[in-house]
Amino acid sequence: MAEARARAWAAAPRPKPEPVELGPVAALLPRLPLVVAFAERPFRVVALEDGALVAHSTICPHWLGPLEDAPVEDGCAIRCPWHGWRFDARTGASLDGHRARLAPAPRVAVAADGMVTLVPADG
């Protein structure tokens, strides 16, 4: 039942996402991790071990657990505090073999001038 609710929530129609400017990379890094709204959904921007900036959903698809404070483990894994399910922060895929995956996240784009912007993943 919870997974069906999560799938329905993820599939609900949303407005066309507009880019969200986060500011210069030098000013953004000290503020990470940072929860931001994109297309009326909460996402968290984190810096991974390799320095890559990624965004991931703050809602676990299992029982809609909170991921806004989940630590990044093993370089790119996010663990839900409720039941321990782990997800790849880059792709949203389960790292535990579950079919569930995080809601699609925006792409973190860093321009040549250092400006960081959240953009649709396909844009």
Image: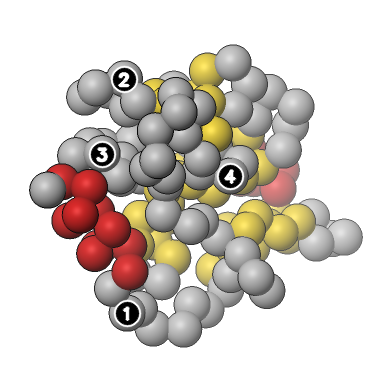
Judged left or right of residue 49, residue 7 is: left
Q: Is there any visible trace of residue 23 in the rendered image?
A: no
Residue 16, above or below 11:
below
Dot 1, crowdedness within 10 Å: few (<14), some or many (≥20)?
few
- SS type, badge 2: loop
Q: Amino acid at mark 1?
A: Pro
Q: Are marks 1 and 4 in contact (CB under 8 Å)?
A: no
> Picture coordinates of residue 20 (x, y %)?
54, 68
Give the mark nearest the N terminus, 1 or 4: 1
Work out which quarter of the rendered image holds the C terminus and state it.
bottom right
Residue placed under numbered mark 3 in the picture = 62
Q: Amino acid at mark 3?
A: His
Distance between mark 1 and mark 2 Cα atoms: 29 Å
| 48 and 64: which is toward the camera | 64
Distance between mark 1 and mark 4 Cα atoms: 21 Å
**Label number found at residue 13:** 1
Q: Quadrant of residue 74?
A: top right
Residue placed under numbered mark 4 in the picture = 91
Which residue corresponds to the image point at 64% horizontal and 30% vertical from the top-left? Answer: 48
Q: Are marks 1 and 2 in contact (CB under 8 Å)?
A: no
Judged left or right of residue 92, residue 68 is: left
Judged left or right of residue 31, residue 7 is: left
Dot 4, crowdedness within 10 Å: few (<14), some or many (≥20)?
some
> Picture coordinates of residue 33 (x, y %)?
49, 36
Residue 9, above or below 28:
below
| 121 and 68: which is toward the camera | 121
